[in-house]
Image: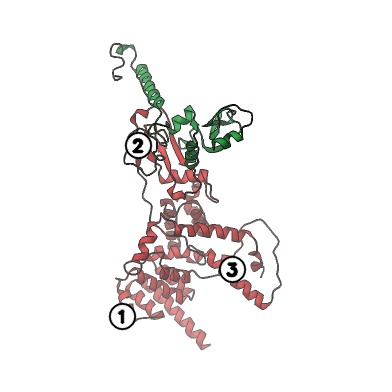
Amino acid sequence: MAALGAWGSALVPARLSRVARALWGWRARRGLVQDAGTADEGKATKPSFEDETVQNLLYKMTGLNLQKVFRPVKKELKPPKYKLMTEAQLEEATRKAIEEAKEKLIMPPVLKEREPIDDVLAEDKFLEGTETTKYVFTDLTYSIPHRERFIVVREPNGVLRKATWEERDRMIQIFFPKEGRRVIPPVVFKDEHLGTVFRQDRHEDILNMCIAQFEPDSPDYIRVHHRTYDDIEKHAKYDLLRSTRHFGGMVWYLVNRKKTDGLLIDMIQRDLLDDATSLITLYHMLHPECQSAKEAKERKLQGVDLIKVFVKTESQKEGYIQLALQAYEEAMATSTAS
Amino acid sequence: ALFAGSRLLRGYRGGHVVIRFALGGCTNRPFFRIVAAHSRRARDGKYLEQLGCLDPLPNAHGERVAGLNLERLRHWLGCGAQLSRPAEKLLGRRGSGRGRGPGSGAARRGSLPLPAGLAGFLPLHPMTVTGAERLRRRAQEAAAPPADGPAGPGDAP
């Protein structure tokens, strides 16, 4: 009950609304061509990350462990607040907690890597030699979105070109600083240092830092996320991300690369059969041409049968999954018998 | 707006709005603010509005960072503000075929017939071209000294 008292602080909603606004801004922004395109394709050809069905499946799999979502974040030390509540008030408080947790679990967007900018606006050859360093000009008009801001570079050889994405991000952070973001990305995001982070099991923290620092379509963001997911998959540490907003992205990545076996075993071992079935449904949505998808559609399988068909046709670690399924069924049998 | 400008300025005679650089910073560390102010005011004194900044020293990535609030710049230029010499060099010359958007303004016309100022906001100041040619000539004369006496200024028609 002390944990429930802790989320009454004002900082949490402020952080939430900022994060939520930043993330909703992504959906609404005009520069995002992918949303417009995939809304039309949708389930017909290839489902995308943003589709409702996909999002529902991913959200179900993420789980809602209130203790983990509202686990104490390192803030300044305040004594805990205790509230005396009736049953009805407690239910009301739990309901509000669930709603806030849902807001915290909104998944960050998964986008393709952005194309590098390579646009020369003017070539003034006679300016060559007048300056020794380049000039970077940023448009500081307050009311234009950052994606449409004009940032140009005048090179010492006289060429006036649009700034590259890295230069753009740096300039925008200098003039319009965003909280949690640094002008020069911290060294921890380099590959050699990510290993240290993973060894300390701090995948969630590094992913949160990555979301704060980089734009979702920058190559650094995608690289850090992919490394994290690969490491989690290698060491089967799926539970670290289970009730966080990164779980959906991880599942999407694994299903697209067909590396779902470890996750399936983990789910069966924790008795999360519903999650396992939704995982396989998602797999079939994304790879409709595989054999288990066709069989499942023909015979309209549900639950454990779906998993068994999937295991027989698609998985690499068949033996492990069969063992896990057997153990689960034995456990079910003993629990129902006793 | 010119009327509003003179309201703020009791006691001065004449003068007009200029867009110029106000120097700030510390010893051996200059920093310019691009500012719309009355011409009779002190260089670093009370200004009408700050329109941007320029850091003349190169940063860790070897670039000189400048920010320009183009929307307000356009407003003040529309009110009839003049530009100081260094501001002209940076932005370009007013009055000779202007109307080009800021450098990366998605090329409102296909190609720029006149060369644009350093930032590409307005067309180029002729002194920039002259200054560039003088620099180049001086560099050439320094590199190839008296041996080239008779064939000196070969390319200047």
Q: What whole-number distance in Å separates the C-alpha atoms at marks 3 and 1?
A: 41 Å
Q: Give percent across and percent down for residue A20.
A: 52, 60
Q: Amino acid at mark 3?
A: Gln
Q: Chain of mark 3?
A: A
Query: Does label 3 or label 1 sit earlier along the sequence?
Result: 3
Residue ID at (31%, 19%): B156
**Above or below: residue B42 compared with residue A37:** above
Asked if marks 3 and 2 fall on the same chain, the answer is yes
Q: Is residue A224 left or right of residue A315?
A: right
Dot 1: what SS?
A: helix
Find disc 3 in the rendering and name its residue.
Answer: A67
Q: Is residue A124 left or right of residue B54?
A: left
Q: Are the residues flagged by discs 3 and 1 in contact, CB closer than 8 Å?
A: no
Dot 3: what SS?
A: helix
Out of A257 and A20, give the one closest to the viewer. A20
Q: Amino acid at mark 2?
A: Ala
Residue ID at (45%, 76%): A274
Out of B50 and A188, give the one closest to the viewer. B50
| Quadrant location, the N terminus of chain A | bottom right
- Indicate which label's residue lies in the foreground, 1 or 2: 2
Q: Are the residues flagged by discs 3 and 2 in contact, CB closer than 8 Å?
A: no
Residue ID at (42%, 33%): B118
Dot 2: what SS?
A: strand
Disc 1 crowd rating (10 Å Cα; few below 14, some 14-19, many 20+) is: few
In this view, which residue lies farthest toward the front? Answer: B3
